[in-house]
Structures are given as C-alpha cells and as structure tokens.
C-alpha cells in the first residue's frame, strides 16, 4: 500500500513557489506519504528536477505528471514523461494519454479552471474528489461526479507553497512500481484521506 499526494506544484508553475529540494526533503522525512506526482502547469521542468533530486532516496516515488490547461478546464496526465502537442484540447489530451498508457484525471472539477459537468462528455480515468485547495462543497460535488461517471476518486493537496504540502493523500493498493500504481488507480484500488 502506497500513500501518494497526486497534485503538487513547484516553482516551475507560474503561480507556485515551492523549491524542488524542499519537496524532496519533506517527502523523504514524511512518516507515511512516500509517493508524489509533480503536476506543474503545462511543463515537466519541476518533475525533472524533483525526480533527479529524489534519485538519492530509495524510499520515495516520483510519478511523472503534468497539469494541462484546456479551454474546458484543467486535466492531470499521470504517467507520461512528455507534453502533449498543442493546441491543448480535452479529447486530444485523453488520446495522448491513452497512447502512452498514462491516466487522465479531472483536476478540481468544481473550482476555477475545472471541467465541471462537461467531464461527463469524455472518457477520463479518475476524478480528483479531494483537492486540498478546494472547498468542502466543491469536493462533495467532485465525489458525486465520480459516482455518476463510475470513476475512482483520487486526492491531491494542489500545493503551490511548501506550507500546503501533504494536506490530503490517496491510499493506493499497489507496491512501489509506478506502472502498478497507475493500474491500481485505474482499477479503483484507492481511498482518499486528509492528513
């Protein structure tokens, strides 16, 4: 079983300030959360820096990820180490992820830059039902969306500063292999929780 924060930003997102080294140091020191996804906005730079720094530690997992802004709303791609081609649109992001055995997650569906009910029109892999920066009401709406669509719910702090890290996590019934983690999420072997 792995506990993962599946939505973290670094200073490589224009609206975030967290240094990659701070993330890696805190993750290594954390007693239970040992996996993260760096989901910077439309860039993999933060992921690359975090992955490189984390290579010194065998007990932590860095899942390749990115948060892509589309005209409909934000989508997290989990498991791809490259950016999709532009222009970004919802269906092309989903197709890009499927071709790479990556997952698409609807990020904070009922907050600014969320897909909201339009998510129903697409074939996503999961819904972010517990976002650390969303209101309880927005998270409840996201839970209902996941139930309606028959999709698993995942959690991410959506941390844009070091103080926001680790507020929520996803418990994943998988070992520390990234491929196994992705498959477990897709199969719904997950539970969301607050720290």
Image: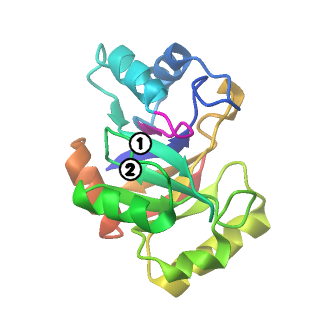
Instruction: From this view, report whether residue 100 is shown above or below residue 189.
Output: above
Quarter of the image with the C terminus is top right
- The residue at 32%/66% (across/down) is 186
Q: How many marks?
A: 2
Q: How is the model colour-coded?
A: rainbow
The reply to whether residue 112 is in sight is yes
- The residue at 49%/65% (across/down) is 90
> Where, by quadrant of the figure, is residue 193 drawn?
bottom right
- Pointer 1: what residue? 65
**Which of the pair 56/89 is nearer the observer?**
89
| Residue 99: percent from left, percent from top | 23, 59
**Which of the pair 70/28 is nearer the observer?**
70
- Pointer 2: what residue? 78
Identify the element where label 1 is drawn: strand
Instruction: From this view, report whether residue 125 is shown above or below residue 23.
Output: below
Instruction: From this view, report whether residue 127 is shown above or below residue 171.
Output: below
Magenta segment, prevailing SS (helix, strand or loop): loop
Identify the element where label 2 is drawn: strand
Q: CA distance from mark 2 to mark 1?
A: 4 Å
Is 51 one of the magenta-colored residues?
A: no
| Residue 23: percent from left, percent from top | 52, 23
Circles 2, 1 touching at the beta carbon (< 8 Å): yes
| Residue 31: percent from left, percent from top | 46, 30
**Which of the pair 190/118 is nearer the observer?**
118
Tell me the crowding category of disc 2: few under 14, some 14 to 19, or many 20 or more residues within 10 angstroms, Cα based: many
Decide which of tag 2 and tag 1 comes sooner along the chain: 1
The reply to whether residue 153 is in sight is no
* Furthest-front residue in this view: 87
**Which of the pair 69/56 is nearer the observer?**
69
Point out the stretch of residues depicted in magenta: 36-43
């Amino acid at each position: 079983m792995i506990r993962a924060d599946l939505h973290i930003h670094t200073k490589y997102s224009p609206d975030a300030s967290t240094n990659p080294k701070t993330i890696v140091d805190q993750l290594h020191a954390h007693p239970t959360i040992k996996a993260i996804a760096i989901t910077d906005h439309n860039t993999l730079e933060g992921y690359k820096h975090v992955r490189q720094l984390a290579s010194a530690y065998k007990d932590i997992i860095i899942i390749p990820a990115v948060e892509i802004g589309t005209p409909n709303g934000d989508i997290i791609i989990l498991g791809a180490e490259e950016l999709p081609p532009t222009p970004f649109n919802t269906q092309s992001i989903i197709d890009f992820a499927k071709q790479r055995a990556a997952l698409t997650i609807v990020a904070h569906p009922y907050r600014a830059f969320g897909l909201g009910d339009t998510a129903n029109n697409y074939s996503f892999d999961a819904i972010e039902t517990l976002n650390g920066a969303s209101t309880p009401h927005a998270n409840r709406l996201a839970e209902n969306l996941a139930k309606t669509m028959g999709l698993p719910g995942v959690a991410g702090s959506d941390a844009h500063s070091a103080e926001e890290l680790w507020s929520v996590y996803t418990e994943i019934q998988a070992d520390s292999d990234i491929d196994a983690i992705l498959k477990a999420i897709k199969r719904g072997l997950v539970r969301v929780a607050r720290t």
